[in-house]
Amino acid sequence: MSKFLKALERAEQDQGLRRASASAGPANRPSLVTDIVAARALPVPPAIPPQVTDGLEEHLVSLIDPTSFEAEQYRMLRHFIEQFRKSTDLSVIAVSSPGDGDGKSTTAINLAGSLAQAPDARVLLVDADLRQSALAQKLGLDAAVRPGLVEAILDANLTLDAVTHEYSQVNLSVVSAGRPPSTPYEVLKSPRFGALLGEARTRYDYIVLDTPPLVSVPDCRVIGRWVDGFLVAVSAHKTPRKLLEEALNVMEPTKVLGLVFNSDDHHLSRTSSYAQTRRR
């Protein structure tokens, strides 16, 4: 696990150098350095039909502005996932974080949006954070129109199709969390959840789960049995190192795919992100 903590330190040091350069003059275009990727926003017009982008949060660059430099960095993350799939048959990817506010939901949506840009990819995005669901709001979905994951787990008569929103224009399907349950842990522990993901595996190339934080609640320890790997989102200058270390320690080492380092650097852009992935 120490390699991920070292990667985080490298990313923070690199960001400090970039901030110093920005104060001295115009910043150079960020580039890939080993496994570290820095991203900044460029003003590129949206390329997705307005009926899809209406109501979407501005940070969802993979859907709103897929030709921007920021979106390219999520494409780099997509590349790592695609390479993992070739060697390990990776299919179900969980995106989590040590605590709240580290950008895991935004990362999950942008990763799914980037994966869905491949013309032959079938991608399903699932909100498995039953305590603080965010996907419906970020994607502008009316959660009252269609039941979600909770209803499908509790009612075996509800099919996967019945709880899935289709974005045919971008080759993306979405399952919202549904109504807040009184006992999220027990709902996620149900074999029915595993059965739904098993069905999804036969119908989609990639299933991206937005999951609860790793440390504060035990949900991911149950979800872990159903997924192939975790991406852990951390926030620059915000996520405590000890919390990150604790988060990495609660997961199976073989299921840690890597870190996604998110930050907000006003010297360079609205949003910067780094990705450190573990090669297999």
Image: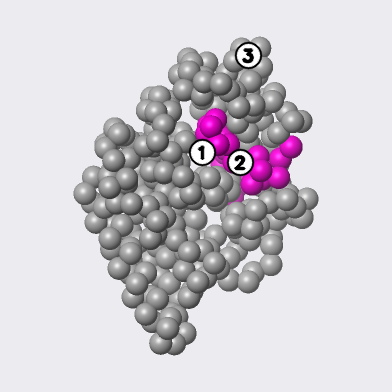
- Name which quarter of the figure residue 228 lies in: top left
Please tell me whether residue 182 is drawn above or below residue 144 in the rendered image. Answer: above
Instruction: Kindly tell me whether residue 82 is visible in this rendering.
Output: no
- Secondary structure of the magenta portion, mostly? loop
Does label 1 or label 3 sit earlier along the sequence? Answer: 3
- Name which quarter of the figure residue 10 lies in: bottom left
Residue at mark 2 = 135
Please tell me whether residue 240 is drawn above or below residue 189 in the rendered image. Answer: below
239 relative to 253 in the view: left or right: right
205 relative to 45 in the view: left or right: left
- Name which quarter of the figure residue 9 lies in: bottom left
- Label 1 neighbourhood size at 10 Å, few (<14), some (14-19), many (20+)? many
How far apart are the two marked residues, 2 and 1, measured between alpha carbons? 8 Å
Asked whether the residues under the numbered discs 3 and 2 touch, taking CB atoms below 8 Å apart as contact, a structural biologist would say no
Where residue 26 appears, as percent x and y from the top left, is 47, 85
Where residue 264 appears, as percent x and y from the top left, is 48, 64
Q: Tag on residue 155?
A: 3
